[in-house]
Amino acid sequence: MSHYEDQYLDLMRHIWASGHERIDRTGVGTRSVLGATMRFSLAGDAVPLLTTKRVYWKAAAREMLWFLTGETNIRPLVEQGVHIWTDWPLDRYRREAGEAISMEDFEARILADDAFAAAWGDLGPVYGRQWVNWPRYEPAAEGPGLYRRAERGHNQIADLVRGIRETPGSRRLLFTGWNVDELAGMALPPCHMTYQFHVAGDRLNGLLFQRSCDMGLGFPFNIFGLAMITRMLAQQCDLEPGEIVWNGGDVHLYLNHEPLVTEQLSRTPSGAPRLKLLRRPESIFDYRIEDFAVEDYAPQPHIAAPVAV
């Protein structure tokens, strides 16, 4: 009987063996294919955590909760010991300030210095900003045909919850981070860019379209995040979680991840971890990290690999 993780390993094997090799934005180089799909069941609290290496799911969960706050500064993440977004502002600081500062010292300054954090910790209008505060414009008092940006934007997540509850048959149950007008101001344009949901009877299914996916480092977090938010939405809307579907656009492995690929493909997946929601908060925005627990997760050792910035 196949394991849910086999489809991931098969895709990794295919990319490494047959992907087109090319130089990418980072200069590191990738092997890449266009278009891939995977499906995972969430029945019985199932969660598609990889077992052939340890996935630090609490870091992924904290990131998802950070997105839902609309926050765009790394400071709240660093306060929680989450470092997955630090590379981008750190790289910018090193280039623009000309200081060869370590990540540890950079994060220490982010935590200790409000002005430094405001200047160097902000990532621009990334994910959370678009999810809960997408820019909205309204007619300006100065005259017809003129518009000004409203003080508060569209909250796509609140609209989504309302839509699932009130119009479950809608084909518009989605949210996206791909705001063309603001891409240039983002430290990194959204990779996991569009989420769509589908109510089938008493089940909620979730789909993610990811325009760009680093299969070695990004995918394990992204698929957990999709499972997590689908479970949260199902709970808030009195539905059972069904399945999640992952669609990748440019799906790639970095050339300097060869040790990771070789080691991971030598391992055999096993086990069936479960994600438990321990509390039902008042709203989708009120979850805390303490509300989530993963059980029966016994992964093989972590495999380190560099992040391409």
Image: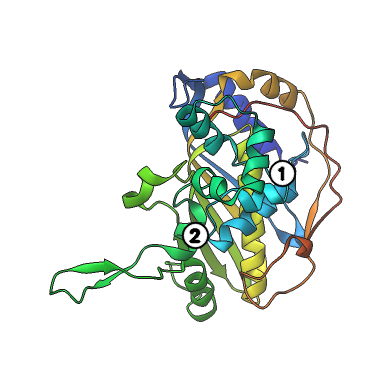
Upstream in the sequence, badge 1 or badge 2? 1
- The kind of residue on which mark 2 rests is Gln
**Tag 1 residue:** 4
Quarter of the figure with the N terminus:
top right
Q: Are marks 1 and 2 in contact (CB under 8 Å)?
A: no
| Vertical order, 231 against 118 (above or below) | below
Left or right: 279 as drawn, with respect to 144: right
Which residue corresponds to the image point at 47% horizontal and 46% vertical from the top-left? 190
x, y percent for residue 295 = 85, 54
> Does residue 224 appear anywhere in the picture?
no
121 vs 77, nearest the viewer: 121
Q: Mark 2 points at which residue?
A: 196
Q: Residue furthest left?
A: 144
Residue at 60% across, 67% down: 204
Q: In x, y percent, where is residue 291?
A: 77, 65
**Amino acid type, label 1:** Tyr
Q: Residue at x 57, y 69 (%)?
A: 200
Q: In this view, does 233 lie above or below 77?
A: below
**Dot 1: what SS?**
loop
Q: Which one is nearer the viewer's eye here, 251 or 198?
A: 251
Describe the element under mark 2 as helix, strand or loop: strand
- x and y, in percent, of residue 304 in the image: 72, 27
User: In the rendered view, would you say 1 is above or below 131?
Assistant: above
Mark 1: give few (<14), some (14-19) or many (20+) Cα within 10 Å: many
The one nearer the camera, 257 or 33, is: 257
Task: Give the foreground label among 1 and 2.
Answer: 2
